[in-house]
């Protein structure tokens, strides 16, 4: 398995993984958007410079020639620019009754891990752990000293994964209809690209 930065060519394989997260979040504003239309918007987002190497970084786990995991994050100060991408792309889609406006999720002065997902067929093989281990290098590259993330109160399995990776609860917040723990860990830089 290889952990590497994503390219625009990966967007079609990234979109269904990110959609797993949207499904879990049960966002009311996405309920009536047909899955193929939502996937099209997500795919377009992960082809933008903003998502790949601009204001944000997308890292993938590749196994057997396919993307089986993804992590997406950015410095907290870039949140508005990152959120603008989905808002702009959803505004162009007839499937959205109104542009998708993401809620603020970061504390601001942190490298925010917006999304991490692993293909259900590859879960339980340590891919999430490997993606997490690669992130400090990207946070350090962006001059951030802390990585932050949100984990749903109703997802104790993910909570344990993050705790084992050194994250601690620093607060909580509502996103949509779900309450989340906000967790942070200090950045201990590692190589930007890891293979295993």
Image (cartoon, helix red, strand yellow):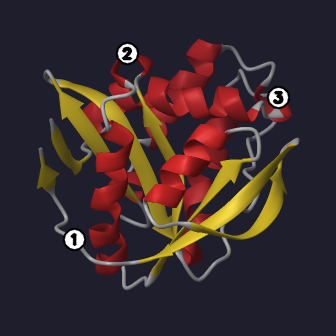
Label 1: few (<14), some or many (≥20) within 10 Å? some
- Is 175 displayed left or right of 189 in the figure? right
Residue at 51% across / 34% down in the picture? 18
Residue at 73% across / 58% down in the picture? 181
| Residue 91 drawn above or below residue 52 | above
Name the residue that disc number 2 marks.
Answer: 121
Q: Give the spatial CA distance, label 3 vs label 1.
A: 43 Å
> x and y percent of residue 51 in the render?
42, 53
Q: Quadrant of residue 44?
A: top left
Name the residue that disc number 3 marks.
Answer: 97
Q: Secondary structure at mark 2?
A: helix
Name the N-terminal-most of marks 2 and 1: 2
Which mark, residue 156? none
> x and y percent of residue 156 in the render?
66, 42
> x and y percent of residue 120 in the render?
44, 19
Label 3: few (<14), some or many (≥20) within 10 Å? few
Q: Quadrant of residue 35?
A: top right
Residue 92 visible (yes or no): no
Q: Nearer the viewer, residue 67 or 49?
A: 67
Residue at 34% across / 22% down in the picture? 122
Name the residue that disc number 1 marks.
Answer: 190
| Residue 80 drawn above or below residue 31 | below
- Is 126 displayed left or right of 168 in the figure? left
Tell me whether circle 3 and circle 1 mark residues in contact (CB < 8 Å): no
Q: Nearer the viewer, residue 67 or 183?
A: 183
Q: Give the spatial CA distance, label 2 vs label 1.
A: 28 Å
Residue at 37% across / 15% down in the picture? 121
């Amino acid at each position: 398995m290889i952990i590497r930065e994503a390219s625009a060519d990966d967007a079609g394989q990234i979109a269904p993984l990110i959609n797993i997260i949207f499904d879990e979040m049960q966002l009311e504003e996405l309920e009536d958007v047909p899955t193929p239309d939502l996937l099209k918007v997500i795919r377009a987002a992960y082809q933008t410079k903003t998502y790949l190497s601009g204001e944000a970084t997308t890292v993938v786990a590749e196994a057997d020639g396919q993307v089986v995991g993804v992590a997406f994050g950015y410095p907290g100060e870039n949140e508005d620019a990152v959120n603008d991408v989905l808002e702009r792309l959803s505004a162009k889609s007839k499937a959205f009754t109104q542009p998708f406006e993401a809620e603020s999720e970061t504390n601001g002065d942190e490298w925010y891990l917006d999304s991490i997902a692993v293909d259900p067929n590859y879960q339980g093989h340590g891919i999430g752990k490997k993606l997490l281990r690669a992130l400090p290098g990207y946070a350090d590259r962006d001059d951030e000293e802390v990585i932050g993330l949100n984990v749903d109160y109703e997802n104790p399995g993910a909570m344990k994964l993050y705790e084992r990776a050194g994250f601690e609860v620093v607060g909580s917040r509502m996103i949509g209809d779900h309450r989340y723990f906000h967790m942070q860990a200090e950045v201990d830089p590692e190589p930007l690209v890891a293979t295993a």
